[in-house]
Amino acid sequence: GSETFTYTPTAGSQNTALIFNNTGSTSIINYSIAAGSLGWASKAITGSIGASAIAALEIDNACVLSTSGTVQITFTPSTGASSTTALLSNAAFKMYALELL
């Protein structure tokens, strides 16, 4: 099923590069980054990472940052993925965040 992770930017930068590593999985992984709380700039970001793929995405932190200073990212294995596709517990999927200065 879906797993939601909380990311807290710490460098005070405006943009973050997210690198998704799905090479440990044979399932497509869908992602949804929740819209932020800054009103005018808020927008959710969605997409998918192919099976056995690596992808990168640059996000504008103002669009996705909550009032508590965090970013909520939900990952969901594609329909039909086996129960062994637990993203956190079996390390089938990894995400790296690089704050751009």
Image: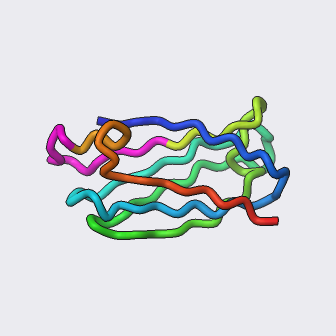
Which residue is at 56% across, 54% downward? 45
Q: Quadrant of residue 15?
A: bottom right
Q: Position of residue 91 (x, y in %)?
A: 34, 47
Give 53 or 34, whichever is nearer the viewer: 53
Furthest residue in direction top, as rendered: 68
The residue that appears at 80% across and 40% down in the rendered structure is 38
Left or right, residue 43 beside residue 85? right
Residue range highlighted in magenta? 74-84
| Horizontal relation, residue 60 to residue 51: left or right | right
Total count of labels: 0
Residue 90, image quadrant: top left
What sort of colour scheme is used for the picture? rainbow
Residue 23 percent coordinates (x, y): 31, 64
Quadrant occupied by the N terminus: top left
Q: Is residue 1 above or below residue 52?
A: above
Residue 59 spot, x, y in % from top left: 66, 60
The percent coordinates of residue 93 (x first, y second) are 36, 52
The residue nearer to you, when weighing 29 against 39, is: 29
Report if residue 15 lies within the magenta region: no
Q: Where is 36 relative to 15, above or below?
A: above
17 versus 75 height, above or below: below
Who's the residue at 18% across and 41% down the image?
A: 84
Asked if residue 80 is among those painted magenta in the image, a careful observer would answer yes
